[in-house]
Amino acid sequence: MNLQPEKLAYELSSPGRIGVVLPECDVPVTALPKDMLRDNLPLPEMDELTVVRHFTRLSQKNFSIDTHYYPLGSCTMKYNPKINEATAALPGWRNTHPLVGAEFSQGAIELMFRLQKELNLIGGFVAGSLQPAAGAQGELAGVLMIRAAQVARGQSQRTKMIVPDSAHGTNPATCTMAGMSVVQLTSDADGAIDLEALKAACDDTVAGIMITNPSTIGVFERNMKEIADIVHAAGGLVYGDGANMNAIAGIVRPGDLGIDVMHYNLHKTFSTPHGGGGPGVGYVGAAPSLAEFLPGPIAVQENGKYLMRMPKQSIGRLKAFYGNFAVLVRAYTYVRMLGEGGLRKMSENAVLNANYLKARLEKTYPVKYPRRCMHEFVAMGNIAEGVHTLDIAKRLIDYGFHPPTIYFPLIVPEALMIEPTETENLETLDAFADAMLKIAEEAKTNPQLLHDAPHDTPVGRLDEVGAARNPVLCYRS
Ligand SMILES: *Cc1c(COP(=O)(O)O)cnc(C)c1O
């Protein structure tokens, strides 16, 4: 509840109020260059309590996993265990500097070496790189690796990537950024890849395929091995988008299914916090066919010492220094905490939770691909005259839930993509399902309630296009 009207820090200012008294300077005082200093810098002046209230209030306007249920499909908004924060904040990690060199960073490089090993074991790969800062950057690495390998084989005419229409939006974008062209494959009525269409698309200009499994519609691609065989026989390589590992980790190893290179999202499956573009890691794992092309440097162990090495035919660096190191500490903590059996249970519960919600909702919100789902499912929101998915999403906010992903994937009209994650209990799943069913009733009896939602937020429906085109990024009185 906001007892005070909304004010910006500048408006709370009162001349002469002091919040902090700076400690004595403990280094020699040096004059600053005159031309870089301003005499007139109107910083807000206020007492400490006002500052604390201001920022605490701002923080509470945010939706977060720590405060609310967050079933945002494709994003795996699972709970981020607090022990991850404790280990990432250990002084040895926190205070180390990337420029001190390998000799004084043995612990940090050992952690990276061990994490690489765990992730390779989980995915069925022989090597991998912790450099990429996001899933999309892992994709870019993988497609550049495929391109480099084809060129090294004397196959530089291979400039096409096959991408199914059920792919994550980043897949075709990645191919384009990597200078490749995209051949789109249409999914069949079951949401699977059409093998005949795939065979027809495979010629000697195809560098490879990008395939998301489990796919973006939340189903497992059963013909994965056959798909990989067809592409390999045609001289192509297979990129796996492993962002949906939360459904299969500890159960299936993508490397065993014929995938040559794959990214995992440590900030999804391996519980490091994400959102708002915050730091992530898109680990790329590789089979022997592509391991030498990985981005680097990679942590290796030689003569009892840990070192960072560039793979022989590396596509190069993607990130400065050691990448997003604190994310690596969190992911390592998580993997070690769960262990092999725990990882399997994580995936099984993610799938169980999604199927439970699907079963409670599918009579009211139709599911286009009704097969048993993996860790997420895609329902449809066109449930009453004049009511759209956007209305349902906005009304959910009134009930205290973060809306699911909407209007994605594009192959499902009025899509509502729901990913419960394994960390939610039965009561929360039921409360969410109850709210969804209540909203479906409201859609029939009082649709205006949905059109006007959200009702209780500081701002209502935003002009998102205007905000993107004309962002106001600084304070104006
Ligand atoms: C999230 C996601 C990505 C992209 O990962 P980012 O870290 O957001 O760049 C790619 N593919 C799939 C299937 C995803 O769910």
Image (spheres, helix red, strand yellow):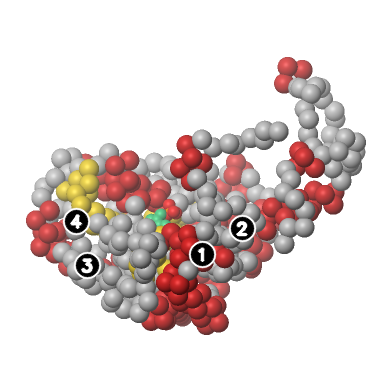
Q: Is residue 365 visible?
A: yes
Q: In the rendered structure, which disc, 4 or 3, sits on the residue that comes first in sequence?
A: 4
Classify mark 1: helix, strand or loop.
helix
Note whether 354 is above or below 34 in the view shown.
below
Residue lying furthest top: 35
Instruction: Give the residue at x 55% y 60%.
Output: 454
Give the alpha-carbon distance from disc 2 to disc 1, as whole Å: 14 Å
> Is ligand 1 less than 8 Å from the beta carbon at label 3?
no
Note whether 210 is above or below 124 in the view shown.
above
Q: What residue type is labelled 1?
A: Leu
Classify mark 4: helix, strand or loop.
strand
Q: In the rendered structure, which disc, 3 or 2, sits on the residue that comes first in sequence?
A: 3
Which circle marks residue 192 in the picture? Answer: 3
Q: Which amino acid does label 2 sit on?
A: Thr
Note whether 9 is above or below 380 in the view shown.
above
Give the alpha-carbon distance from disc 4 to disc 3, as whole Å: 10 Å
Classify mark 2: helix, strand or loop.
loop
Quarter of the image with the C terminus is top right
Give the alpha-carbon distance from disc 4 to disc 1, as whole Å: 40 Å
Question: Mark 2 and 1 residues: CB-CB less than 8 Å, in contact?
Answer: no
Say few, some or many: other residues with alpha carbon within 10 Å of mark 3 (under 14 / 14 to 19 / 20 or more). many
Please name which of the two marks, 3 or 2, marks the residue nearer to the observer. Answer: 2
Q: In the rendered structure, which disc, 2 or 1, sits on the residue that comes first in sequence?
A: 1
Q: What residue type is labelled 4?
A: Leu
Quadrant of res 406? bottom left
Q: In the rendered structure, which disc, 4 or 1, sits on the residue that comes first in sequence?
A: 4
Instruction: Give the residue at x 56% y 69%.
Output: 399
Which circle marks residue 457 in the picture? Answer: 2
Please name which of the two marks, 2 or 4, marks the residue nearer to the observer. Answer: 2
Q: Name the residue under label 1.
A: 449
Ligand 1 quarter of the rendering: bottom left
Q: Mark 4 points at which residue?
A: 185
